[in-house]
Amino acid sequence: MKRLLLATALSLLTATSAAAQTVYVVRHAEKADASSDPVLSAAGVERAQALSAALADAHPDLILVSPLQRTALTAAPTAGHHGVTPVAVPFDGGVEGQVAATVARVRAQPSDAVVLIVGHSNTVPLIARALGYADAADMPECEFDRMTVLHLMGEGAHGQVSRYGAAAHCATE
């Protein structure tokens, strides 16, 4: 009887793990200038390619970006590799509205979906927290290499932070 209960529990754990959404949350790559809607710099183009390489086996079902071209340009190599058209989530309602709309789109996906979100230094931590990853740290303006990987199961999230591409160099005080 104990073996049967253990086998059932392990089966449920395995089934639950297989049904977890995987969400990759990154900031856009380095921008060419400080204008309101810049393209990527040469380093940013390289980072966008590095993101595509890092997610080569991820097979995203959905790619969410902001309406600003630096997020779409960051996502473009990954989108092209996987044949997915990025969806721009507008800033209706400001940052809070954009974060809420992004989270709603993720939550509307099937339980086994893979999603890539390309946001901004102020939205990436907010999105990760809104998806249930309370440990998401604020992001300094100089940080471009953080990739937060979330596994969503219901309202809960398990996450980890990794790095991709060239190391971002933030000046220390």
Image: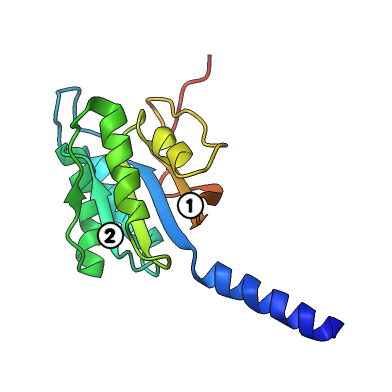
Work out whether residue 167 can be spotted: no
Where is residue 14 shown, x and y percent of the image?
A: 61, 74
Q: Give neighbour class at mark 2: few <14, some 14-19, many 20+ (Cα, 10 Å).
A: some
21 or 154, which lies in front?
154
Which residue is painted at 26% across and 50% down in the image? 64
| Place of residue 44 in the rendered image (x, y in percent of width and height, measured from the top left) | 27, 42
Which disc number belongs to residue 62?
2
**Sequence order check: which comes first, mark 1 or mark 2?**
2
Dot 1 lies on which element? Answer: strand
Would you say 65 lies left or right of 157 here?
Answer: left
Residue 22 pos. (x, y %): 44, 59
- Asked whether the viewer can see residue 61, the reply is yes
Residue 144 vs residue 90, the one in the foreground? 90
Q: Which mark is residue 149?
A: 1
As drawn, which residue projects farthest toward the right?
2
Residue 88 position (above or below residue 50):
above
Amino acid type, mark 2 = Leu
Mark 2 lies on a secondary structure that is strand
Tell me which amino acid carries mark 1: Val
